[in-house]
Image: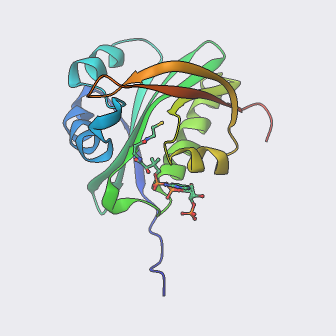
Amino acid sequence: MTPPREPPTLCDAGVDGLPEVMTTMADAFDPVFGEAWTQSQCLGILSLPGVWLTLARIDDRPAGFALSRVVIDEAELLLLAVRPADRRAGIGLALLEHVAHAARTRGARRLFLEVRSGNPARGLYDAAGFRAVGTRQGYYRGRDGTAHDAHTLERRLDIR
Ligand SMILES: CC(C)(COP(=O)(O)OP(=O)(O)OC[C@H]1O[C@@H](n2cnc3c(N)ncnc32)[C@H](O)[C@@H]1OP(=O)(O)O)[C@@H](O)C(=O)NCCC(=O)NCCS
């Protein structure tokens, strides 16, 4: 029998949340593809207006995070990650819906993101109502220098 899914606790955080983010980042992203950000990249973006960090916790321990930005009426999901041990329990989707709601509240009408071609995360975005609107050739640069394309996905926030 599948164990019941416990909903995560979601909370917004500032730079104080970065140690938790960096631990999850190291666990969640395969360095082969060059999708993870460094701490200084996260620190830099968090100082910009319209950027916010959301932490997901299960039983008060870190399980995932989302980093997002809104500029006027467009929002962007910059990073989304769930620890491997906590996957397929609805945490990614809960973070995504939380970000979509927060972006709408901040005035965004569309939510964008980039996902590496071949990343299984695409399954989550398809399930959450995103559609592909473009491709960026060689957007990610892997550890060995290999370039990986990114698909740009969009979800309208002004229709339900
Ligand atoms: C992508 C990621 C955040 C998903 O987190 P998650 O908590 O496992 O996602 P959820 O449990 O909320 O998934 C909800 C639904 O999305 C789809 N989905 C999620 N992960 C999927 C996968 N690997 N393959 C196919 N579909 C998937 C499924 O429909 C799933 O529902 P189901 O489990 O009932 O079938 C997580 O796999 C991750 O951190 N990956 C590494 C980092 C990364 O690539 N981030 C995205 C960068 S753009």
Instruction: Give the percent coordinates (x, y) of residue 15.
Output: 25, 26
Instruction: Give the percent coordinates (x, y) of residue 141.
Output: 36, 22
Q: Is residue 154 left or right of residue 159?
A: left
Q: Is residue 65 left or right of residue 20?
A: right
Q: Judge whether 65 appears above or below 115 on screen.
A: below
Q: Quadrant of the C terminus?
A: top right
Q: Judge whether 136 appears above or below 17 on screen.
A: above
**Quadrant assignment, res 104:** top right
Measuring 21% from the left and 42% from the top, which residue is drawn there?
23
Q: Is residue 75 visible to us here?
A: yes
As rendered, which of 123 and 3 lies closer to the eye?
Answer: 123
Instruction: Give the percent coordinates (x, y) of residue 54.
Output: 40, 38
**Quadrant assignment, res 3:** bottom left
Total numbered labels placed on residues in the image? 0
Q: Which residue is the extreme one toward the right?
A: 159
Q: Judge whether 58 appears above or below 109 on screen.
A: below
As rendered, which of 105 and 142 lies closer to the eye?
Answer: 142
Instruction: Give the percent coordinates (x, y) of residue 63.
Output: 33, 53
Q: Is residue 58 visible to us here?
A: no
Q: Judge whether 98 appears above or below 50 on screen.
A: below
Q: Is residue 99 left or right of residue 43?
A: right
Measuring 27% from the left and 57% from the top, which residue is drawn there?
60
As rendered, which of 9 and 134 lies closer to the eye?
Answer: 134
